[in-house]
Amino acid sequence: MAAAEKAVTKAEVSAEKRFDSVNEFRAAMKDQTSSFADKAQVDFRLGAIERKLEGFVGVNQGYTNIWGYLIGAVTIAAGVAVVLTRFIK
């Protein structure tokens, strides 16, 4: 009977140690998840970044259009100059 009581006591101590380590793990996971950003925060911040990037794309497209117009104007001016020099000679 004494051996059975010792075995039960050892099993209880072992189970308590195991549950203590499980509880420590749960506490660590709870601390970790409390530091994570939630979905609403992430969506809000990513939305702000996307709006800023869309603004930059519009500005970049404007610069591209200006360069196209400038090159077109220079090409037309050069063509007109060539035609005028042919007629003057």
Image (tube, rainbow, N blue to C red):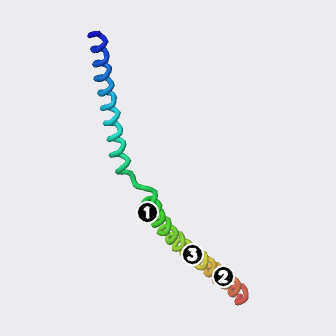
Residue for badge 2: 76
Q: Quadrant of the C terminus?
A: bottom right
In the image shown, does 76 or 31 lie closer to the viewer?
Answer: 31
Is residue 42 or residue 59 the one in the foreground? Answer: 42
Report which residue position mark 1 lands on.
Answer: 45
Residue 31 is situated, as x and y percent measured from the top left of the image, at 33, 46
Placement of 26 over or under 61, stated as above or below: above
Numbered mark located on residue 54 in the image: none
Q: Nearer the viewer, mark 2 or mark 1?
A: 1
In the image, which is nearer the foreground, mark 3 or mark 2?
A: 3
Can you say whether 21 is above or below 45 in the image? above
Per the rendering, the mark at residue 67 is 3
Near-viewer residue (24 or 10) = 10
Q: Amino acid at mark 2?
A: Ile
* Residue 74 placement (x, y as % from top left): 61, 80
Three-letter code, disc 3: Trp
Left or right: 22 in relation to 51: left
Q: CA distance from mark 2 to mark 1?
A: 47 Å
Q: Residues within 10 Å of mark 3 (few under 14, many from 20)?
A: few
